Image: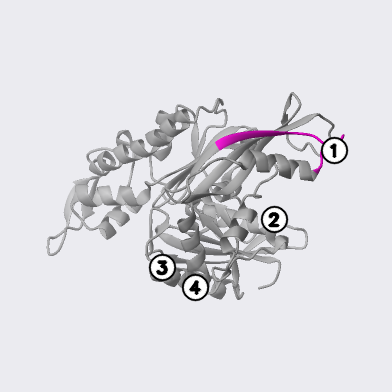
Amino acid sequence: MDKDTVVGLDIGTTKICALVGKVREDNSLEIIGIGTYPSNGLKKGVVIDIDETVHSIERAVERAEEDSGCEIDAVYVGIAGGHIKSFNSDGSIPLKHKEITKKDLERVIDVASAVAIPMDREIIQTIVQEYIVDDQEGIQNPIGMSGVRLGVRLHVITAAVTAAQNIIKCVNKAGLDVCDIILQAIASSDAVLKDDEKKGNVILIDLGGGTTDMAVFSKGAIRHTSVLPLGGSNLTYDLSIGLRTSEKEAEEIKKKHGCSSVSLVSKEELIEVKGFGAKGPRKISRRRIAEILEPRVEEIFSLLYEDLMKSEIDIDLNCGVIITGGSALLEGIVEVAERIFRVPARIGYPKDVAGISEIVKEPMYATALGLVMYGAKERKKKRKFRIRDSNIFLKIMNTMKKWFSEVF
């Protein structure tokens, strides 16, 4: 794989997706291949079966290699799961010199990152929200400025150490190097948010199979992130129980006939549902499907809204809510989001990148595309992590702590 080829590996609860991109001479990005395979070794974003996960990764990568004509040996990997937690932290230092240098920025970030966290957790990412020089706030790049004291406001993301270890182990067992690890919500935001939305105030909700990720942006920086251990798989399970059918059949019904807003469907609209075992098919109202799905979608959005309120972020969501991910196309989901958050909402489709197929333009591929876009910008740094390295975690954490050490 040459230096201008980048691969994003989205290790999801329901599917593994390997997306191959090529950076052209003008630094534009072209998508040249994709491979997907069902994911059988994860639950709510966390690895529960290493062998199954490795097998799914291998199959997805093989398909991406066939599609792109490239041999893949390194990938940019997304991380998610209910173990992800975040908070905001401030720090400040006195300035030794007349002008602020890059070392001053590194020093103040280290001070703001020096917070007490449980032994089983580790800081995986620190994102600068803004710098403060003396009493002047909202500074994006203070290098070269004069001042007496330099401050910083950080968004700090933590994860369970073992969860990150198992993700890396699975990728390595599949014969691949991990170039970098990126929080999936951040990757998705790169793929679907417009520049003016990032600079405004907007919520990105990535509704995946096992988890729902939320990232809140204000004035060009992430102010809050969270991961909810509920997703599309919960909708499928609810339908399976409510309709007394298999989860496989429930998944198909959700995709073809699902609706999360009862007001949008009528009782007269009927569909056919297969029963368990030898029982024959039966007719049910599509409105019944909406009656099952609407409460769960309301629960997911309500929990995210409560989490947002608890964060005490003081922003006016002038850009509204953007919904992406595998379950974003469920009919009525925009209406439920607008009702819960009380702001406009829209579906977040991946950006129109050169070579991208109509398939990849679906919201379920937002994370994979975002990982490729991130890799295209960071590919020259040549980071590689392997589990067999004795100091793997020291290398991972030191690198991750420097992610986004400049304003997003």
Around disc 3, counting alpha carbons within 10 Å, would you say few (fewer than 14), some (14 to 19), or many (20 or more)? some
- Residue 173 is tagged as 4
Q: Is residue 398 visible?
A: yes
Q: If you read the primary sequence from the N terminus, does the residue marked by circle 2 or circle 1 appear first?
A: 1
- Residue 377 is tagged as 2
Tell me whether the residue at label 4 lies in contact with that at label 3, contact meaning CB atoms closer than 8 angstroms.
yes
Tell me whether the residue at label 2 lies in contact with that at label 1, contact meaning CB atoms closer than 8 angstroms.
no
Q: Which residues are magenta?
A: 88-101
Tell me whether the residue at label 1 lies in contact with that at label 3, contact meaning CB atoms closer than 8 angstroms.
no
Residue 181 spot, x, y in % from top left: 57, 57
Q: Mark 2 to mark 3: distance in Å? A: 30 Å
The residue lying toward the viewer, choosing from 233 and 284, is 233
Task: Give the residue type at disc 2.
Answer: Lys
Q: Nearer the viewer, mark 2 or mark 3?
A: 3
Q: Secondary structure at mark 4?
A: helix
Q: If you read the primary sequence from the N terminus, does the residue marked by circle 2 or circle 4 appear first?
A: 4
Task: Give the residue type at disc 4.
Answer: Lys
Q: If you read the primary sequence from the N terminus, does the residue marked by circle 2 or circle 3 appear first?
A: 3
Q: Mark 1 to mark 3: distance in Å? A: 49 Å
Task: Give the residue type at disc 3.
Answer: Ile
Residue 234 spot, x, y in % from top left: 32, 49
Quadrant hosting residue 126: top right
